[in-house]
Image (cartoon, rainbow, N blue to C red):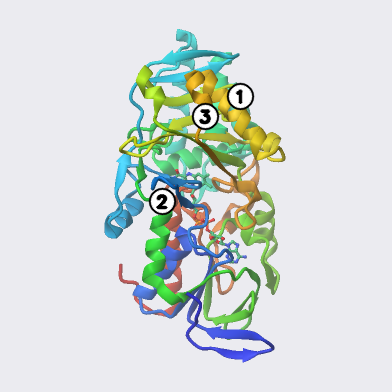
């Protein structure tokens, strides 16, 4: 996958020409490239890593089971992901969640019926009315332009934490609501603009859709891993993808745009940058980025998360009628799910350490995190948890070309001041990446939607007809 359409050599650098260059071979960039190729455009995708898939990364274990160190779940409403999976012949299966969930607090474990948190009636009612208020608010947000909401100013000045304290009345209800921030955004509730939270819930289709396992954001997984979506798109694109070529600089002039990457310059009419805004902000530009766009890239940090898998001979917790889903008051992990293969040929728990907890643990050794994770799992599921066969983790903050996950987030004040710069093209540069989506932003579905939207923008300007 390392050859462009035209090659001239000057000063040791290749010069390749195409109609459209796409920076980033994650799901978003690949979807944009696929659509533009279909429309008849000559496209090159330039990828920094030596692989495609970006924030999806699947790994095959020695026993033949595939695990996902990045994105893994698909929801029933994620139509683009499901259509692509069907086209590629990828098999999905529902996340196991039969039996009782577990809650580990102060070293004591409680067993909970599915969907239930064992809390006093006033806490339950309080949380329910908070959830309803959030859902109502989310339904009023214009997903194309959240800053146009009549209360945008007030909502954007307020953190999710402040909104929760104003809207909910019980300590338990507030605590439970704030726990959503690390689980969904991988930052703490005090770091998020309330306008962003409302936008995000609106864009996913509601509270339950985003947070639930069955029927929601954690509904199903891919037998052969979620990265297969990108690998499938990449196979279609063939040698139009250049791997191992970090883009350093983009130079626009009156006749085109030059994308300077490792050992090559790509000359194109248009470029789609399909990375998170934070990562896009690390590319140098000539002429420099407009002030608001540059300021946006300075203000949209990536969430922080460490994803870990504990691998066992069998899913032993199921013997006790336990679902494997657990919430804990520990940092490592705070949240876990049964991640065993469909045939339960081995037992796998996936755990997440998110938000400030990930920052507390990022500089500790893998061995320390493994030890802490085993202790937490033992607290939830008993001594059998100590007989762990393997432990595999990925700290996404350390990934040079992601610098965090699951996505970039909007702290207070950013949507209303800089939001317009999120998708607005700058000269010949167009923006894709899941952060620019209006449907399931932050997810692979959003990545695909954003790629398709950017491809439509460019196809119209090039005068090629996009055929889907
Ligand atoms: C641990 C984790 C769990 C997640 N869970 C889920 C889930 O269950 N379901 C779900 O749908 N989503 C999940 N997500 C989110 C999902 O993976 C992302 O939303 C999606 O993959 C983003 O795709 P993208 O193409 O927009 O960006 P990316 O995947 O980040 O792609 C950007 C690409 O650009 C490349 N790049 C960066 N800088 C340069 C440069 N200078 N030059 C050239 N190339 C560059 C990167 O290497 C990368 O390949 C998760 C993510 C993580 C990390």
Q: Position of residue 90 (x, y in %)?
A: 30, 53
Q: Residues within 10 Å of mark 2 (few under 14, many from 20)?
A: many
- Residue 357, quarter of the rendered image: top right
Q: Position of residue 66 (x, y in %)?
A: 41, 47
Horizontal side, residue 217 vs residue 255: left or right: left
The residue labelled by disc 1 is 330
* Nearer to the camera, 465 or 433: 433
Q: Is residue 217 visible?
A: yes
As drawn, the label of residue 226 is: 2
Q: Position of residue 456 (x, y in %)?
A: 41, 68
- Residue 250, quarter of the rendered image: bottom right
Horizontal side, residue 228 vs residue 130: left or right: left
Q: Is ligand 1 less than 8 Å from the beta carbon at label 3?
A: no
* Mark 1 or mark 2: whose residue is earlier in sequence: 2
Q: Residue at x 59, y 32 (%)?
A: 160
Q: Residue at x 53, y 81 (%)?
A: 268
Q: Is ligand 1 less than 8 Å from the beta carbon at label 2?
A: yes
What's the distance in space between the residues labelled 3 and 1, CA to CA? Answer: 9 Å
* Nearer to the camera, 39 or 360: 360
User: Does dot 2 land on a helix, a strand or a loop?
Assistant: loop
The residue labelled by disc 3 is 335
The answer to the question of whether label 1 and label 2 lie on touching residues, with beta carbons closer than 8 A, is: no
Check the image and report above or below for 125 versus 188. above
* Mark 2 or mark 3: whose residue is earlier in sequence: 2
Q: Position of residue 382 (x, y in %)?
A: 49, 18
């Amino acid at each position: 996958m390392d050859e462009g359409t035209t090659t001239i050599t000057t000063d040791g650098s290749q010069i390749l020409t195409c109609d459209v260059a796409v920076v980033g071979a994650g799901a978003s960039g690949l979807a944009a490239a696929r659509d533009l190729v279909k429309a008849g455009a000559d496209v090159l995708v330039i990828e920094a890593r030596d692989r495609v898939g970006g924030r999806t990364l699947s790994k095959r274990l020695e026993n033949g089971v595939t695990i996902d160190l990045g994105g893994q779940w698909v929801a029933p409403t994620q139509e683009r992901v499901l259509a692509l999976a069907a086209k590629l012949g990828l098999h999905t299966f529902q996340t196991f969640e039969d039996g009782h969930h577990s809650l580990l607090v102060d070293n004591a474990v409680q067993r909970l019926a599915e969907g239930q948190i064992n809390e006093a009636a006033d806490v339950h009612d309080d949380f329910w009315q908070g959830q309803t208020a959030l859902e109502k608010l989310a339904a009023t947000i214009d997903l194309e332009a959240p800053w146009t909401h009549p209360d945008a100013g007030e909502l954007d000045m307020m953190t999710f934490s402040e909104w929760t304290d104003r809207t909910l009345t019980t300590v338990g209800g507030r605590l439970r609501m704030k726990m959503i921030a690390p689980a969904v955004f991988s930052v703490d509730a005090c770091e998020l603009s309330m306008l962003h939270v409302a936008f995000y819930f609106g864009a996913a289709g509601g509270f339950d859709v985003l947070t639930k396992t069955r029927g929601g954001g954690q509904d199903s997984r891919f037998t052969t891993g979620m990265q297969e979506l990108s690998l499938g798109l990449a196979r279609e694109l063939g040698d139009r993808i250049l791997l191992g070529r970090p883009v350093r600089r983009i130079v626009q002039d009156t006749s085109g745009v030059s994308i300077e990457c490792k050992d090559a310059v790509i000359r194109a009419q248009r470029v789609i940058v399909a990375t998170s805004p934070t990562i896009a902000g690390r590319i140098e530009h000539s002429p420099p980025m407009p002030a608001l766009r540059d300021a946006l890239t300075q203000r949209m940090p990536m969430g922080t998360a460490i994803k870990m898998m504990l691998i066992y001979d069998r899913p032993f917790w199921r013997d006790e009628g336990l679902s494997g889903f657990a919430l804990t008051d520990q940092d490592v992990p705070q949240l876990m799910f049964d991640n065993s293969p469909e045939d339960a040929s081995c037992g796998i728990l996936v755990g997440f350490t998110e938000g400030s907890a990930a920052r507390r643990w990022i500089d500790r050794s893998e061995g320390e995190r493994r030890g802490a994770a085993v202790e937490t799992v033992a607290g939830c599921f008993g001594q059998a948890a100590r007989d762990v066969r393997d432990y595999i983790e990925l700290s996404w903050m350390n990934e040079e070309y992601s610098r965090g996950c699951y996505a970039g987030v909007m702290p207070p004040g950013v949507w209303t001041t800089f939001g317009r710069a999120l998708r607005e093209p700058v000269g010949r540069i167009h923006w894709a990446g899941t952060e620019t989506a209006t449907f399931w932003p932050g997810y692979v579905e959003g990545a695909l939607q954003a790629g398709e939207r950017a491809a439509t923008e460019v196809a119209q300007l090039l005068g090629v007809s996009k055929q889907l």
